[in-house]
Image (spheres, rainbow, N blue to C red):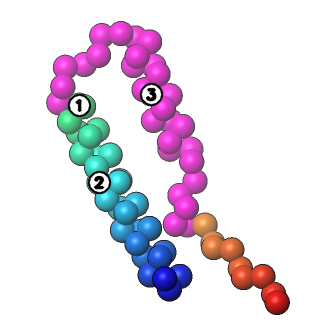
Amino acid sequence: MHPHTHLQLHRIRSAELRRQAADFRLAALRRAPRGDLRTQLGWTMVELGLRLIPDRSAMPSRAPRPA
């Protein structure tokens, strides 16, 4: 498979997953709020951790090794 095609497939899948995550967050907001403080803190920490992960699309790809 051509590298550019492979990369494009990854970008499409990434966009799909981000859309699904956004839909899930909206659905979670519509549900009744969680009463357990420990649970709320845990999910807040997970969200914060996910925001700290660098966006891979902004990172340059590896250069090919010289032969």
Classify residue 11 by image quadrant: bottom left
Q: Which residue is mark 3?
A: 44
Q: Which residue is mark 1?
A: 29
Question: Is residue 62 left or right of 65 when viewed as pictured?
Answer: left
Residue 17 lies in magenta, yes or no?
Answer: no
Visible in this render: residue 39? Answer: yes
Q: Residue at x 44, y 12 (%)?
A: 38
Q: Amino acid at mark 2?
A: Arg
Q: Amino acid at mark 1?
A: Leu
Identify the mark at residue 19; answer none if there is no mark.
2
Magenta extent: 30-58
How far apart in space, not on screen, are marks 1 and 3 (Cα)? 13 Å
Cβ atoms at labels 1 and 3 below 8 Å apart: no
Q: Amino acid at mark 3?
A: Thr
Q: Secondary structure at mark 1?
A: helix
Residue 41 lies in magenta, yes or no?
Answer: yes
> Can you give x and y, in whole percent of width and height, for residue 45 in the image?
50, 28
> Can you give x and y, in whole percent of width and height, for residue 42 in the image?
47, 22
Visible in this render: residue 4? Answer: no
How far apart in space, not on screen, are marks 3 and 2 (Cα)? 19 Å
Q: Secondary structure at mark 3?
A: helix
Who is closer to the viewer here, 58 or 18?
A: 18
Could you classify mark 3 by the number of other residues whose Cα lies within 10 Å: few (under 14), some (14-19), or many (20 or more)? Answer: few
Cβ atoms at labels 3 and 2 below 8 Å apart: no
Furthest residue in direction top, as rendered: 36
Q: Nearer the viewer, mark 1 or mark 2?
A: 2
Q: Earlier in the sequence, mark 1 or mark 3?
A: 1
> Can you give x and y, in whole percent of width and height, for residue 31 in the image?
18, 25
Q: Residue at x 55, y 61 (%)?
A: 56
> Can you give x and y, in whole percent of width and height, for residue 66 in the image?
81, 87
